[in-house]
Image: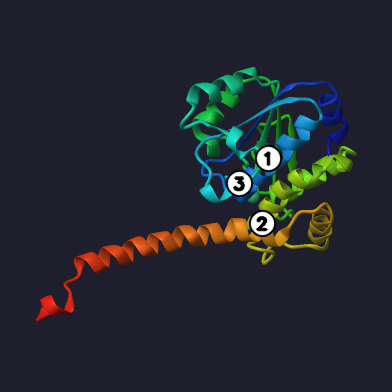
């Protein structure tokens, strides 16, 4: 992987690190951010995650999700995190324009910026641009990144669940962008104890539950507003 030795050198001593991802973060945005968060914490860095806007409820169970600073709700904390960062990781987006005001704040900073992303046409704003448009997800790239830094033994079940979540959602449950390498990674995650059935249930069935509640609410409204057969005469 390009520039990996320079990045390894940068990460060799504890740093103030900021991880950020795109607006309306999805499973891959949050999964890759939390995967990197757990990894960098293990290396002894002080890590904060800033997302421009809220993540969906079905990702709230992920360990560390509660620590994510949402710019829309906690602007001052987010601003402080950007100002104090020595290294900023930009995950799952290819241009600072995609993260609105957070992008403006980062653009002004002259700290080290590292982009890890799988979208086409990455902008040239970072010192290190790790772009792999053949990757299924940025989460898959986080696995590659940790492996390239010779730290694969640091990938545990918790970190693996974050990466698995991103892979699962960005591939639409392994329907798109799969490869032999992706399945090799997934098999390694399962060997660490990642429970694929449990995660599929947490991610997809909680969405269904929400939709069911909405449907129930709508049916309730219909029952109370439509005339009873007797009223119709
Ligand atoms: Mn993605």
Q: CA distance from mark 3 to mark 1?
A: 12 Å
Badge 1 marks a residue whose secondary structure is helix
Q: Earlier in the sequence, mark 3 or mark 1?
A: 1
Residue drawn at x 82%, y 43% is 155
| Label ID, residue 34 | 1
* Circle 3 or circle 1, nearest the eye: 3
Q: CA distance from mark 3 to mark 2?
A: 10 Å
Q: Earlier in the sequence, mark 3 or mark 2?
A: 3
Expressed as whole percent of the image width and height from the top left, the position of residue 56 reads: 52, 47
Cβ of mark 1 under 8 A from ligand 1: no
The residue that disc 2 covers is 199
Vertical placement of 95 versus 233: above or below? above
Badge 3 marks a residue whose secondary structure is loop
Quarter holding the C terminus is: bottom left
Vertical placement of 61 versus 11: above or below? below
The residue that disc 3 covers is 61
On screen, residue 6 versus residue 164, left or right, reads right
Residue drawn at x 58%, y 60% is 204
């Amino acid at each position: 992987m390009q520039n990996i030795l320079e990045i390894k050198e940068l990460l060799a001593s504890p740093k103030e690190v900021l991880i950020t991802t795109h607006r309306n973060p999805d499973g891959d945005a949050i999964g890759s951010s939390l995967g990197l968060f757990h990894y960098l914490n293990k290396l002894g860095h002080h890590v904060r995650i800033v997302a421009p806007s809220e993540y969906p409820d079905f990702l709230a169970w992920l360990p560390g999700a509660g620590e994510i600073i949402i710019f829309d709700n906690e602007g001052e904390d987010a601003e402080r995190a950007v100002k104090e960062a020595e290294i900023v990781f930009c995950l799952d987006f290819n241009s600072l324009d995609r993260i609105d005001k957070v992008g403006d704040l980062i653009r002004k900073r002259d700290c080290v910026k590292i982009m890890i992303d799988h979208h086409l046409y990455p902008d040239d704003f970072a010192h290190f641009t790790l772009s792999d448009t053949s990757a299924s997800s940025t989460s898959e790239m986080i696995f590659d990144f940790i492996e390239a830094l010779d730290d694969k033994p640091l990938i545990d079940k918790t970190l693996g669940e974050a990466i698995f979540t991103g892979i699962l959602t960005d591939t639409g449950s392994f329907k798109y962008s799969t490869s032999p390498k992706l399945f090799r990674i997934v098999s390694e995650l399962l060997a660490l104890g990642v429970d694929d059935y449990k995660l599929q249930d947490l991610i997809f069935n909680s969405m269904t539950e929400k939709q069911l509640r909405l449907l129930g609410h709508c049916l309730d409204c219909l029952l109370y507003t439509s005339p009873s057969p007797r009223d119709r005469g």
